[in-house]
Amino acid sequence: MLKRLIYVFIGLLLIQSGVAEEQEIVNIDFLKERYSAGETVQAVITTEPLERPLKAEQFSLYVNGVKKPIAPFFSRYSANSYLLYFDLPIVVNEPVYFRIEKILYSGSGVLEEVTVEKQIAIINEPLSILSIVPAFIVLDADQNEFQIQIENKKGGTALNITSSESVTHPYSDQLQIVNFNGKRLFRFAVDQKKLGPEDAIFINHEGVDYKINILKRQQIVDVENQTTRAQQGVLVFIATKPEVRKTITPDMVLTGILSIKNEGNLSLENIVLQFIGDIRKIATMDTTTIPQLLAGQSLDITLSINEALDASAGVYPGILKAEAMGTEAIFPIYIEVRQKESGESINKTTVDLDLKENVPITRDPDIRANLSKQRQETSERSYPLGLMVMTLAIIVLGIVFSMMRKKKVVKDEAFDDYIKKIRK
């Protein structure tokens, strides 16, 4: 009996260690313990080395068991860490879960697909609700300025802004006013030589604290492992950059060609494309539905931002989302419209976003091999134009030469007959 109890105890320990190991594959840390409906959620995601990096389309929000649309801003900070923020829906019925799906992991030597989720604790009667963009500041090497847009969704109009010593701004001396349902941009300068790992912007509104971390951009070099493909349709956006982040003036129009591809093994039908978030106020595209996308097939979509030249000053965050048959792709877009200074000339300017890849999309080795084989077969069947012209010329010359030869023979025979007649 004692031996049996020992075996049971050991088995329970093994089960618990296995569960813990799976949970530690991806760890989700929210910067606040509780959030209000409509508030900006900030999350730091850390992972074990994965079979391939996480993508924005793997993130989803479930409210009381129902999947809700969100516009996540997501960036890979290091090889195994990610920064994510998004606004919760205005109306929230608990429970609320943030979920990361289709995580490919092979730490035990066997490739497996893992789903990780974490509950978001909700404050039912909040005193303060702010929407903050961006909710993480990631600085480029030569960047010494940045700005934050704050939207007041609930609470008083006054808020207090402070920062670490590496950041300078004019907002510490007095309370700042952001009207209810209003937005305001705040500008900051930073000395990266003094920047520490814990430096941040601190905002207090109605006794509720918000922290905006300030980080230096890290260089990431790795190779994405794509040895396996799910036996289904898989939508992905193919572009020269992972997101669009631009500052424009009201007289500027942004255009770009973004490719969407089915990287799965099955055909996809009735693909729906839409803008989510504030970006939909100033962005358009040339199509909102794609009837069918075969396995391995790609299609170009033309995006236009501020095409009507009617964008007001402000920040327009959001995503372009494509969805069909259980798969979706997300492409983040962040546009700031800056009002022109007095005296600046106003001229309509069109800027190409340069999203289109210049080389054929051949990420899958099988696709590359098939394309190479098709090119070889095409080359074998093709007949060069120069050789065709040369062959035709030889044939024509042969015909002319033959006709002239016959004509000469006829003349020679006629002359011989003539001589014979004379001699007679």
Image (tube, helix red, strand yellow):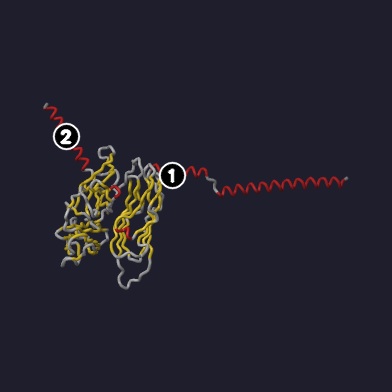
Vertically, is 200 above or below 340? Answer: above
Query: Extreme right residue here?
Result: 424
Residue 127: percent from left, percent from top: 16, 58
How packed is label 2: few (under 14 Cα within 10 Å), some, or many (20 or more)? Answer: few
Of the pair 206 and 81, the residue shown nearer to us: 206
How packed is label 1: few (under 14 Cα within 10 Å), some, or many (20 or more)? Answer: some
User: Which residue shows up at 33% across the image and 41% down it?
Assistant: 230
Of the pair 386 and 279, the residue shown nearer to us: 279
Q: Is residue 85 visible?
A: no
In the picture, measured across the screen, residue 392 lies left or right of residue 145, that is right
Check residue 12 in the rendering and tell me which mark sits there, or answer none: 2
Going by the numbered disc 1, the residue's amino acid type is: Leu
Report the residue marked by disc 1. 371
Residue 254: percent from left, percent from top: 36, 61
Quarter placement of the C terminus: top right
| Camera-nearest label, 1 or 2 | 2
Label 1's element? helix
User: Which residue shows up at 16% across the image and 66% down it?
Assistant: 175
Of the pair 125 and 254, the residue shown nearer to us: 125
Going by the numbered disc 2, the residue's amino acid type is: Leu
Quarter placement of the N terminus: top left
